[in-house]
Image: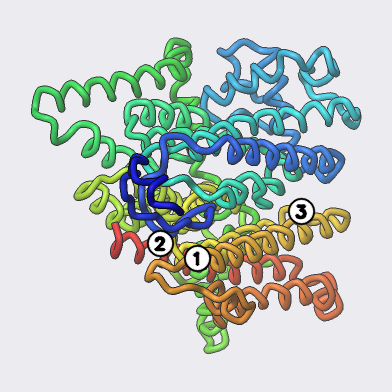
Amino acid sequence: LDPRLTAHRPQRAQTTPHPVRPLQISNWTTAPMAATSSPSTAAAAMWAFAAAACVKLLLVPTYRSTDFDVHRYWLALTHALPARQWYTDASSEWTLDYPPFFAYFSRLLSLPAPFVDASLVDIPVPAAPPSSAYILYLRLTVAFSDLLLLASILLLARDARRRQRPFLALLLVLWSPALLIVDHIHFQYNGFLMGLLLLSLHFLEQGKDLAGGVVFAALLCSKHLFLVAAPVYFVYLFRHYCCGRGLARGLGRLVLMGAGVVAVFAMAFAPFVYYGQMQQLLSRLFPFGRGLFHAYWAPNFWVFYIVLDKILAFLLRRLGFSIEIPEASFTRGLVGDSSPFSVLPKVTPITTFLLVILAMTPCLVKAFANPQSKHIIRWVAYACSCGFMFGWHVHEKASLHFTIPLALIAMDSLDDVRHYFLLSIVSCYSLFPLLFEDQEYPIKVLLLLTYGALMWVGFSSHFAANPAPGGEKLDASDNIVEKKLTGWISLGYLLGMFAIEFWSRLFHHHVYGDRLPFLPLMIVSVYCGIGMMYSWIWQLSWIIRHT
């Protein structure tokens, strides 16, 4: 250029050029996220929800468990009878045993029911098989209630206190095969309840502790089994919301939080206090006479306890000792209040309660000493894991209470990814015995394999595009991903599930005939119990070392 033409041109300020960074869905660092998530993330989440809704519609004609009859009866009960009779009516074996807010929810769902099929709200329940419209309406109520789960997921994606969550983490919740199996085949409303839990966790992550506590109180008034997370909520809210702000302000916040929680419980239980039915209601909510085990053993600590008892009883009988074998046998499942143990001490509800609190203690100490909102999801998930592992009369479906929240933080670190990959597969596989009819077998297998492939491809792509916490770039080759994602021990453990399926589906009947019908279920419970115990130990170790 001619310098005479540029001599009087204004000079631009010298700036240091910034390197252009590739667009990343997420980063392994813990930098704060923007105030709102991108519109594309919200739109993608809604499209994912819509795709899941299509799958739910395809599952309408599938197997329905007795829970279908339970919720159908509760729909009719809350519609046909006044509230004073909800917890005293015994005209059906499916008595109402959920807290009042869920009863109000059933009442709300029952309002349009007569316009679809009048028999939906008839008491007693008609003996005739339900019509197609009857079945479709109840199935659609479950899918419709999942909108709360979607809303909570969208709010969590916009969390202002943490970095923007990867879309894959949201997808892991919306496409959970365990949730599809339990809610949309077996039939329950866990998506609605998990939406309440995630909404509460969203408020806590944002620092809106009062709203988080009130929503959690509403959750407890909808399903009391979430009480296991109450100690973590109490310790965290007391330290994070009430303490460290001066005596007067701290007491004021404590009173405000207490008033909010009491108001929620009053809305739920005050009518039944007025009717003088609280004792009856509580006996419905906490039927300790049902026994330690459900008919199908949840894969928790007590599986190993009872198996050890059976082994000791067998060995002592072979040695000549007189050991009485209880009527409740592991070949037929365990239901009722009789003790199923021959050698080991009988387990009581207070024993399980103390074990749950003891297992939860390290988490409570951490939450009290250093209450940080970024850890609240992990702490609540661990509390639910403790209830699952050591609780009384635990249902296998309760694994949703910690696997769903853990999906949101599954990509926070490489260790979290490896842990969730194993846990989610084990949790879903442990639910397979719920669908015992042959026509549902390909469905549950396809759901699990699809979810496993989604995790494998998604995590592998993320590893290839993002640096590890130490800054090391990960190779995208299958060998590297395999070592990082599973390892040989966890891979061998997961492959063992195929061996169990081959035995249960092909060889058990030929070897034993009609004998030991509960043996395949026991094998699934024990094998999945190993994975669940590993998950509980891993979570405990992580909390002790990192929070």
Q: Nearer the viewer, residue 294 or 158?
A: 158
Amino acid type indicated by mark 3? Leu
Q: What residue lies at 29% left-to-right and 19% top-to-bottom?
A: 259
Where is residue 186 drawn, in percent x and y? Answer: 73, 45
Which numbered disc, 2 or 3, marks the residue that appears first in the sequence? 3
Find the distance from the CA under tag 2 to the CA under tag 3.
29 Å
Q: Name the residue tied to disc 2.
A: 539
Quarter that holds the C terminus: bottom left
Where is residue 29 drawn, in percent x and y? Answer: 39, 58
Q: Is residue 416 above or below residue 10?
A: below
Q: Considering the numbered disc 2 on the image, is that residue within a helix, a strand or a loop?
A: helix
Which numbered disc, 2 or 1, marks the residue that appears first in the sequence? 1
Find the distance from the CA under tag 3 to the CA under tag 1.
26 Å
Residue 538 appears left or right of 127: left
Q: Considering the numbered disc 1 on the image, is that residue within a helix, a strand or a loop?
A: helix
Depth-wise, is mark 2 or mark 1 nearer the camera?
1
Which residue is situated farthest in the left direction here? 247
Quarter residue 542 falls in:
bottom left
Q: Name the residue tied to disc 1.
A: 419
Find the distance from the CA under tag 2 to the CA under tag 1.
9 Å
Residue 168 bears which disc, if any? none
Q: Name the residue tied to disc 3.
A: 435
